[in-house]
Amino acid sequence: MPDIQMLPLLASYFEVSVDELIDYVPMLGREQIRFHYQRLAKAFGDRAFGEVLEECEGMIRKYYSCYPFLLQMVVLLLNHVEAADTEQNRNSAVKMALELCSHILADCQEVGICKSAVGLKGVLNLMQGRADLVIEEVGEEALRADYMENTGELLTMAYLMAGNLEKAEYAAQIGMYQSLMKLIDYAVLLLDISGKKAVSERKIAVEEEMACGHELLKRMDKILASFEIRKLNPNAAGKYEYQAAVYLAGRLAECRADKEAHRAAYRKTNRETGKGSGREAEAQPRTVTENQMEEEIFRHLEQYAAACRQLFADGIRLHGDSFFSSLDDWFEEMELGTTAVRSSGSVRESILMGFHNPVFSILKDQKRLRRLAEKCDADCNVTKQEEICWKSGI
């Protein structure tokens, strides 16, 4: 073996780095991390626990600056610690995993990896019966509405283990509420994505795409009804109902465009062949008729209007209900409290303009749309000036 002082000279001679010269790779790729994880996971089932633990320790020393790998080593140890053959080996595995979490949190600059490390460290502490450490390290700021970390569940389990049922219930209610709001937000995004995919990727059959969209609407309708979202958070309910109407209006426009294209092709064929039955061919039958689709659009628009009315009836403020009884206290702790982040006039103007979306021009019953908008206008106490804007088309 060459003297260590010769390594830079040798690396320079061969025009490589010292790491490459000694075959040292400080970072592993995703596939390599996956390979080593699966290999070591299999080893825990085939070989003595202590022997595999030593191999893990050697791998950790070798790739001590590869934080994605270290995070997966924590996951590996966490998933296999209960298979330890002795209490000493179990404690060694937990200690190793905890030290890795601390190392990641101290030195890693990647936010996502650090967030995962916080959660894993909390689970390890709970396994050790250290609920007090979880509460201390995670802190009650994890329950704040403007806190982005996903540690509410961990804090709930810690409070439960510590016997503080009141705090555990408080944290669980907040976590459930936040999950519901995220679910609605994702549903709105999925509807928007589905609509844009149908426009940009015409190879997607309208019927097939509509089936997926209707399934999403069916499931979300049940969730909103079960948790009474329109009463609990009319703003969230309104966003969903409005996007559902926009999505369906887009699909209705596509159906009519396809139907017209079919008729045009039929007329062209008749002109070229000189044949015809005297009437235009109808488009292929659909499982959902255009009239049914239009009625469904109006149903969602009416639900949207009802959510808007509820929003103003509540004074445009956040609140809980009989089920989410802890939310009122939680909202009060927010920086802006329960008050709206926009003025009532701005909110009313947005509601009005929502009915003016060009996508709804596809609806045959424009009078019904106008009546619905005017009623929502009156119920939300829209000012006279805003009424003039609506009627003038501004």
Image: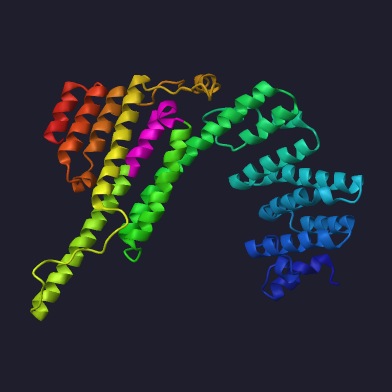
Near-viewer residue (349 or 161): 161
For the N terminus, which image quadrant?
bottom right
- Residue 212 horizontal/vertical position (percent): 41, 54
Instruction: Examine the structure image and report whether residue 243 is included in the region drawn in magenta.
Output: yes
Direction from residue 301 to residue 261 in the image, left or right? left
Image height of 1 relative to 309, above or below? below
Where is residue 226? Give x, y as percent: 47, 34
Frontmost residue, 59 versus 19: 59
The residue sitting at the bottom extreme is 273
The percent coordinates of residue 176 (x first, y second) are: 56, 33
Q: Position of residue 187 (x, y in %)?
A: 43, 44
**Residue beneath the point at 78% across and 44% down:** 99
Among the 4 quarters of the image, the one containing residue 368: top left
Q: Is residue 115 above or below residue 250?
A: above
Image-based side of 202 in relation to 63, left or right: left
The range drawn in magenta is 228-244
Q: Is residue 61 magenta?
A: no
Q: Is residue 251 visible?
A: yes
Left or right of residue 263: residue 187:
right
Q: Which residue shows up at 92% across the image and 48% down it?
A: 86
Image quarter of residue 122: top right
- Pick the quarter of the image with the C terminus: top left
Please name the colour scheme applied to the rendered image: rainbow
At x 75% / y 47%, what residue is drawn? 100
Magenta region, main secondary structure: helix
Q: Quadrant of residue 203?
A: bottom left
In the rendered image, the residue lying farthest to the front is 277
Q: Can residue 110 be seen?
A: no
Which one is in front, 298 or 200?
A: 298
